[in-house]
Amino acid sequence: MIHPLNAHSHQSVTLGEIARLLDAELIGNAMLLVSRIASIQEAREGDLTFLSNPHYRNQLLTCGASAVIVGKDDRDCTNLVRLVVPDPYSAFRQVALFFSPLLPVKAGISPQAFVHQTAHIEPDVQIDAFAYIGKDAVIASGTRIEAFAAIGDDAKVGKDSRIGPHTLIGHSCILGDRAMIFGGAIIGGDGFGLAPENGEWKKIPQTGRVVIGCDVEIGANTTIDRGTLGDTVIGDGVKLDNLIQVGHNVIIGNHTAIAGCVGIAGSTKIGSHCTIGGAAMIHGHIEICDKVQISAATAITKSIAKPGIYTSLMPFSEHEAWRRNAVKLRHLDLMSEKIKELEQKLLALERKNQ
Amino acid sequence: MIHPLNAHSHQSVTLGEIARLLDAELIGNAMLLVSRIASIQEAREGDLTFLSNPHYRNQLLTCGASAVIVGKDDRDCTNLVRLVVPDPYSAFRQVALFFSPLLPVKAGISPQAFVHQTAHIEPDVQIDAFAYIGKDAVIASGTRIEAFAAIGDDAKVGKDSRIGPHTLIGHSCILGDRAMIFGGAIIGGDGFGLAPENGEWKKIPQTGRVVIGCDVEIGANTTIDRGTLGDTVIGDGVKLDNLIQVGHNVIIGNHTAIAGCVGIAGSTKIGSHCTIGGAAMIHGHIEICDKVQISAATAITKSIAKPGIYTSLMPFSEHEAWRRNAVKLRHLDLMSEKIKELEQKLLALERKNQ
Amino acid sequence: MIHPLNAHSHQSVTLGEIARLLDAELIGNAMLLVSRIASIQEAREGDLTFLSNPHYRNQLLTCGASAVIVGKDDRDCTNLVRLVVPDPYSAFRQVALFFSPLLPVKAGISPQAFVHQTAHIEPDVQIDAFAYIGKDAVIASGTRIEAFAAIGDDAKVGKDSRIGPHTLIGHSCILGDRAMIFGGAIIGGDGFGLAPENGEWKKIPQTGRVVIGCDVEIGANTTIDRGTLGDTVIGDGVKLDNLIQVGHNVIIGNHTAIAGCVGIAGSTKIGSHCTIGGAAMIHGHIEICDKVQISAATAITKSIAKPGIYTSLMPFSEHEAWRRNAVKLRHLDLMSEKIKELEQKLLALERKNQ
């Protein structure tokens, strides 16, 4: 999965083995071989598929798969060889992981890597060609640093992590165990700290770090700035998609997931177990409590103290309809005034008519 | 054009040669030398300019160019030496290409590159210093791989392609012929596939590929995720600008062009011959038919089955005017209720007055 | 600050020295040692803190700092050892810079770098492992080129600049003095110039440059395209945050600051001393005058000729309230019509009742 440069080889297994893996009831031939998990739409002979969304039940009738994972309610909805489990989606995840496990790390440092003599590298670490490891950096056991990854001075990367190509882990930053950092992610660039002086912008040194918990994923070309004073902090189990901007001194709580193209301005604190939809924008210096869901394309401009779903998306329409409505949008205040005026006039008239 | 690291040298040519190239009528000295094409605003002696927008016709009077390309209607609007053609913009494109052709590839593999011994590299391919080519990767004829580009195991790059610096073509991904991949583009990172289990996010292995057609351009720092099961597919002639996010299992039809900062969430299908404006956001799991135009800064939240222009942009205004209208935006529902109430009261009054 | 790969070592200084640096009045022990500047919330023994926002005055009472920088009005609001200055925020900036100065450059070219034999490198320049310097490129005195940075042919980098990891300075582009280019920034990729011909997109060669003034900062993974004809121009003192897209032939005036995730489409001209909030989107071919402030998440679709603040942000609310209002948003035109109708009917009724 995380090794963007290395492919998996596929092997065939019997359905009996998979039934044991999933602790599933097997209806049909236990010796049948499958070599891949595939969607109902794409599965062909030799594939195992799964039905987790009842919406696709009819498509099972024409599906070319050799076997299917179904829930208990769908036990008899097909004649295919089938594995019956309580949660087909979770079973799909397990089987997918079985077919495509995290590639093992091959211990060793490429002669084409740059590793500072003072760096502390555990013996079972893999460091690829064109990786760069700075002074006093620490790379824990079981971790792989891929081509074109740069680990700054004093930075620490936790155990069993995968640091993808073209990434930067800036000096003094800390990554927990099992980190997955995808291509082009830049962690620990300077925050955007400027003071206006005589019509010019003067840079404020950014002296903090980025401190990242365990089991965190950071998507391709995402950027996380170091703190100005103090740290930018990403909690355990946080999942960040691609092209996200996390400003200096932001704090993101445990197990929060954020979709692509989101921007989070500096010094904002986001709670645990939140989800933020794609292209949302979060202002700086605000606080969002735990268990908040922010919809895609939504701008959050002030703190949120109550769990729930929050939205500011402008609905789309055909351009001409939009144009007619957009003109009115600029005059809502006037419309509101007119309504008040009408209410008063009508009241006057009603009184007169009594 | 695509070689971000190498400059062109400029040469002078006679207008007679350019007239032949364009099959244009030449009015004036065929031996006049020009060495560059420039805009009407910037052109000076030795430059050839062009008039494609009638808006700029007056600026021709003071333009410093040595010669100009004009349409048939503008044949006599200037005293400059001129080339008369049916479509001046297309002629401009041809001349620009003539002055700045795609740089030829210099066959050879830099000793400072990393090329896996099993990779299949055609003899006329150029591989620059600090390029990385993985196991069993295939690089077709006439292609150049620039510094800091990484081609994963089993990946295939088509003929006459240009793979720019700091790019990733992830393992098993496929690029068609004449691909142009700009700096920092990450193709084939993992999709953002997560299953919630007991309040934590569990990663779903991303086992698909990215499959890209011929004549595709992918802009700087754009990211395209590999499919979960099955592939993410980019059609022939698709043009993607910078900083675009394409989610897992997205399908983009032939000859669709997408401007910068757009996000497309997973499993969405976009038709052929569509255009998507900058900073638009497209939800996941929807379908957009052929020949749809989506305006800039527009959020598309459901499928579109009819060609046309679609928009959801919120119009801007001076901050104070915006503030007054924005307050009302939160109470549109109430305004609508009041209008209904007024209608009823007015109706009652009208009846009374009959 | 700008060296993402190298850490600072911290040293202790006496408050007396800092008082001299700031030209401050010192109340308390001049021999007291401090080794760090920290926020009021995080400061502990050995730290110097500062009070610039009166909002935090109460927190000084429980603050663990050894000393504090205060303004003249707050001279007596604490018993801590204190430095009294006219502008505590500016003093904070000076002290932060004192503790974390720009790391000195170590002259020398790494044997693991690629430097073209025709490149002109001043003797005191630092070029790190895995840096790439193209043909005829010029690197001025006091500048550092970090790992994985690529400087194209004929490009020029000014004095005392810091070119961060994974950056591209494309061929022929020009950077002024004291440039700070953060990780992954791509400067001088092709503009998105396409001409439609027979239902396909034909590429227009992008032959211009990117020309950048002095004292410019460019954030992580930001992209700036080269001009089509003529140049893309970034003025002196401009500060760009992360993940910004600047299209071809854009001109940005001096001392303008732009926050993260902003997109600026091609050929737009932005004035001097402007500020643009995060995730704003600016259309192409428009002109924005000096001293304009654009709010976050705002789309600017036409030229602005008057200084001021401009906004188009859609306010957020709880999802259900949003849903009710959003339905009405699609029918604003109708609401407006109904109001007009009501006005007319009411007028008729009033006349009848006179």
Image (spheres, coloured by chain):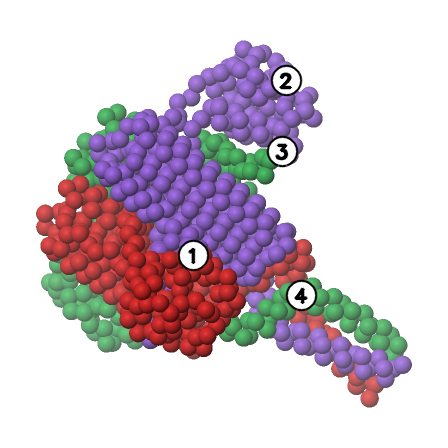
Chain colours: A green, B red, C purple
Task: Please state which of the two labelled residues, at mark 3 or mark 2, is closer to the viewer.
Answer: 2
- Amino acid residing under circle 3: Asn
Report the disc number at residue A332: 4
Residue at position x 29%, y 56% from top?
B11
Residue C273 lies in quadrant: top right
Q: Does residue B262 show up?
A: no
Badges 1 and 2: C-beta atoms under 8 Å apart?
no
Q: Could you tell me which secondary element the residue under label 3 belongs to?
A: loop
Give the chain of mark 2: C
Badges 4 and 3: C-beta atoms under 8 Å apart?
no
For label 1, the residue is B44
Q: What whole-number distance in Å separates the C-alpha atoms at marks 1 and 4?
A: 51 Å
Query: Residue C154: x, y in percent?
Result: 31, 44
Residue situated in front as seen by the camera: B80 or C6: B80
N-terminal-most mark, 3 or 2 = 2
Image quadrant in which the N terminus of chain B is located = bottom left
Task: Please state which of the two labelled residues, at mark 1 or mark 2, is closer to the viewer.
Answer: 1
Query: Residue C231: x, y in percent?
Result: 42, 52
Q: What whole-number distance in Å separates the C-alpha atoms at marks 1 and 2?
A: 61 Å
Q: What whole-number distance in Å separates the C-alpha atoms at marks 4 and 3?
A: 37 Å
